[in-house]
Image (cartoon, rainbow, N blue to C red):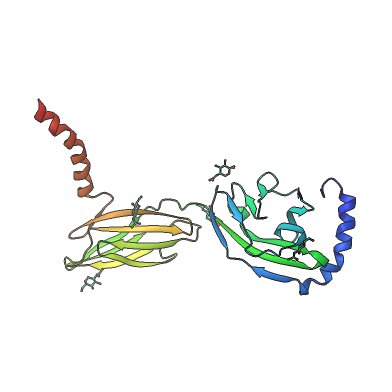
Amino acid sequence: MCSQRWEWCLALELLMLPHLFLATSIQGHSEHPVTAISGSNVSLQISSLPANYTQLTWLYTADQKILEWESKRTSFFNSKFKERVRLNQNHALYIYNVQKEDSSTYILRVLEEYGREKEWYISLEVHDPVPKPVIQIWKTQEVNNACHLQLSCMIPNQSINYAWYGDSGLFSTGLQNFVLEITVEPQNYSKFYTCQASNPVSSKNDTVYFTLPCKLARSSGVAWIATWLMVMVPIVPGLLWT
Ligand SMILES: *[C@@H]1O[C@H](CO)[C@@H](O)[C@H](O)[C@H]1NC(C)=O
Ligand SMILES: *[C@@H]1O[C@H](CO)[C@@H](O)[C@H](O)[C@H]1NC(C)=O
Ligand SMILES: *[C@@H]1O[C@H](CO)[C@@H](O)[C@H](O)[C@H]1NC(C)=O
Ligand SMILES: *[C@@H]1O[C@H](CO)[C@@H](O)[C@H](O)[C@H]1NC(C)=O
Ligand SMILES: *[C@@H]1O[C@H](CO)[C@@H](O)[C@H](O)[C@H]1NC(C)=O
């Protein structure tokens, strides 16, 4: 509506100017943040809208309107969302194919009867799926009867939570905690070391295999035997039949 009849819109904005000066009296409410994976469709929904309102506006930031609903009509503004949004029945903002750049605090502005304005804030965080980590073996050093290990599984330029596992469970976990440095002895080594990289929407891992006294390999003998068995098992009955 506003893109076609801008004079009318301007007049309306001017009429609404007094609201700007009342900004401090506008009630603002924050909804729970929404987390989504890139490429998915999300719905931003406000839990308790007032019963009667005359106008409803979804904004991307305080000064970028996405769409406006008034008198049963929805108008879309010229924004990067133009072809990707819809106003749902319950006046939730439905966004298709969200991207990382869509992360923001969205605002729902509602004009009630008698001109009282209310605002809701709902933040959307869009994440790409984590890439598969690759464990780098920084150090394997035999000292007396022990083995000193230093492993890294860094994924650059991303905020990632790393967790390191061995066969007795979790060693350590933490944001940006991508290095595992341990000393093991024959009585407490683990047959494998797994690094799990996660962000709020996905998780992937990599594993290296340990053999005494102080050796790490990217694949385990056990895995090789399992593959061998999978090949052999169908062959053996075949041999028995003939
Ligand atoms: C998102 O919505 C579009 C259009 O309705 C649909 O084609 C697509 O399958 C949806 N994507 C997901 C991940 O649900
Ligand atoms: C909303 O407006 C309708 C029609 O004007 C009225 O009948 C109704 O009582 C109002 N509801 C509330 C909760 O104010
Ligand atoms: C990581 O960030 C640095 C500097 O910001 C940049 O030079 C580098 O190309 C980035 N690496 C990746 C994998 O995005
Ligand atoms: C293994 O045992 C040695 C000696 O008790 C200890 O120094 C080391 O920290 C232990 N390593 C792990 C991973 O528990
Ligand atoms: C590692 O990833 C595999 C699938 O790729 C999954 O089955 C396994 O549970 C994961 N392990 C850990 C410790 O996250």
Tell me if residue 96 can be seen: yes
Image coords of residue 113 (percent x, y): 80, 64
Q: Residue at x 82, y 47 (%)?
A: 3
Q: List x then y, in percent, for residue 199.
A: 47, 59
Instruction: Name which residue lies at 40% across and 62% down.
Output: 162
The foreground one among 24 and 154 is 24
Does residue 77 show up?
no
Q: Is residue 2 above or below residue 229?
A: below
Residue drawn at 21 percent across, 60 percent down: 214
Residue 96 position within the rendered picture, expressed as x and y whole percent measured from the top left: 61, 47
Q: Position of residue 59 (x, y in %)?
A: 71, 58
Q: Is residue 173 left or right of residue 52?
A: left
* Quadrant observed for ligand 4 in the rendered image: bottom left
Q: Residue at x 74, y 67 (%)?
A: 118
Q: Quadrant of the C terminus?
A: top left
Q: Depth check: 11 or 216 in front?
A: 11
Q: Quadrant of residue 50?
A: bottom right
Where 163 falls versus 97 (above or below)?
A: below
Please identify the residue farthest to the top as the structure is shown: 242
Q: Nearer the viewer, residue 68 or 182?
A: 68
Occupied quadrant, residue 22: bottom right
Q: How many marks?
A: 0
